[in-house]
Image (cartoon, rainbow, N blue to C red):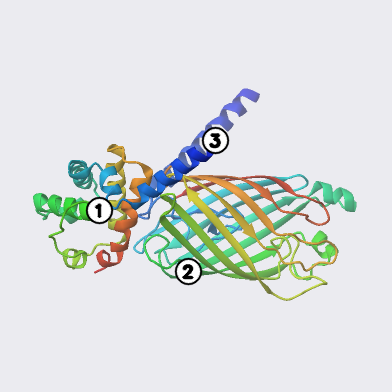
Amino acid sequence: MRSVFGKYAANCVAFLLTATIDIVHADSGGRLLATGAATQIEGSAGGGIVPMAVLSGYDTRDEAGGTAFVSRVDTKDYRLDSIGAAWSWRNRVELSAARQELRLDTLAGALGVPDNTIRQNVFGAKVRLYGDVVYTATPQISAGAQYKKNLDFFIPSAAGAKDDSGVDMYLAATKLFLAGFADRNVLLNGVVRWTKSNQESLVGFGGDKRNSREAVFEGSAGLFINRHWLIGTEYRQMPDNLSFARAQDWKDVFVAWFPDKQWSVVAAWVDLGDIATLRNQQGWYVSIQGSF
Amino acid sequence: MRLTTILLMALLSGCALQASKPDDLYRELGQEQGIKTLVTKLLYNIADDQRIADQFRDSNVERLRDKLVEQICVLSGGPCVYTGDTMAESHAGKNINDMHFNALVEDLIAAMNSQQISVSAQNRLIALLAPMHGDIVYH
């Protein structure tokens, strides 16, 4: 019985893998390798924690394309899993959806509450306003919005968060400098985000200290060792709305691998600072993206 | 300590010297013969590339090859003169889009890889070609 089930499961996994690879190999767009970036934790094209002005996938101004991703952040006391997909049209508009699931066993234990998971849905839209990340002298500029809905608001509410849903708006500028440093291609990305989210809104929106949007800065810098390997760092400023616990800025150092236009893998060491009174949340981040 | 200083100075002066030579890239591409081989490989890649082969079907291949060699020679600091049309003139009305342009870049990278041209020289050559994008696509 067991072996029959095992065989069924193996066949099933093999079928799903083949189907995924078929879909993914069906058609890759006409943009250059790595110009679709990876997918950041909220589902927008970007690095690991910071979005970029580039749109997901490899579609040019005459094509459409998309991506799907999974990622995990694992720190001392928290684990965040994200899964999602993005679709972009004519290198102009990107639509994305992601589901996040945060495990917080240490905090739940300390608070003596049974909930050990906070789930959140994120729906994103991004529009390329101007420029091309590779070919124009000025950076590629995009405007984006992320609507987020926290599905487990008990703990955020207890921490003093005011709303379980909200919208972040951002302006991103991204530029690849060909042979920019030591004859290697250099990627620079800057984002201004208008937000009142607490810890990327996993702890809701607004708080007792502050309940209005503010502009925060996010940035990424990377160096392409060759066409396939990018090393870099990210920084994401966090609003500090709750008197219950201070929020600290997030940062990471990452390695991204673009073996071909179908796949990308990002691995990072992240430092999220103190989160909800639990100190020094450092750990690993991994994401895998498929493009179609 | 002294050895480190000497090595460091040698390294620094070496770098400075390297950067000041205007025909550095030309040499790294293998000078005239290297560029001729590179362009020939590029044209073979284009002919095999379904995305763009049709765009070149009516071209005079001999002339195209000579003009590309001249152009890359001049761009890389070599002792040549470019005698072809401007990029805007030679691509006008050909309906070249981003996908076509990037396909050619990919074919060029493949040719440079097969010529074992270093990543740094590849990046420098592409950096010199990239600004032509605006004169070539969607005209």
- The residue singled out by tag 1 in the image is B77
The residue lying at 41 percent from left, 68 percent from top is: A131
Q: Quadrant of the N terminus of chain A?
A: top right
Q: Amino acid at mark 2?
A: Ile
On the image, the x and y values in percent for residue A203 come to 76, 61
Front residue of this view, candidates A232 and B45: A232
The residue lying at 16 percent from left, 63 percent from top is: B90
Whole-angstrom CA distance, mark 2 to mark 1, is 33 Å
Which of the chains bears the disc numbered 1?
B
- The residue singled out by tag 2 in the image is A141
| Labels 3, 2: front one | 2
Q: Report whether residue A272 is seen.
A: yes
On screen, A39 above or below B118? below
The residue lying at 28 percent from left, 62 percent from top is: B132
Crowding around mark 2 (Cα neighbors within 10 Å: few <14, some 14 to 19, many 20+) is many
| Labels 2, 1: front one | 1
Whole-angstrom CA distance, mark 3 to mark 2, is 41 Å
Whole-angstrom CA distance, mark 3 to mark 1, is 55 Å
- The residue singled out by tag 3 in the image is A13
| Labels 3, 1: front one | 1
Q: Is residue B21 left or right of residue A199?
A: left
On the image, the x and y values in percent for residue B28 come to 29, 43
Q: Amino acid at mark 3?
A: Val
- In the displayed orientation, state which residue is furthest to the front: B2
On the image, the x and y values in percent for residue A168 come to 63, 69
Q: Secondary structure at mark 2?
A: strand
Front residue of this view, candidates B135 and A148: B135
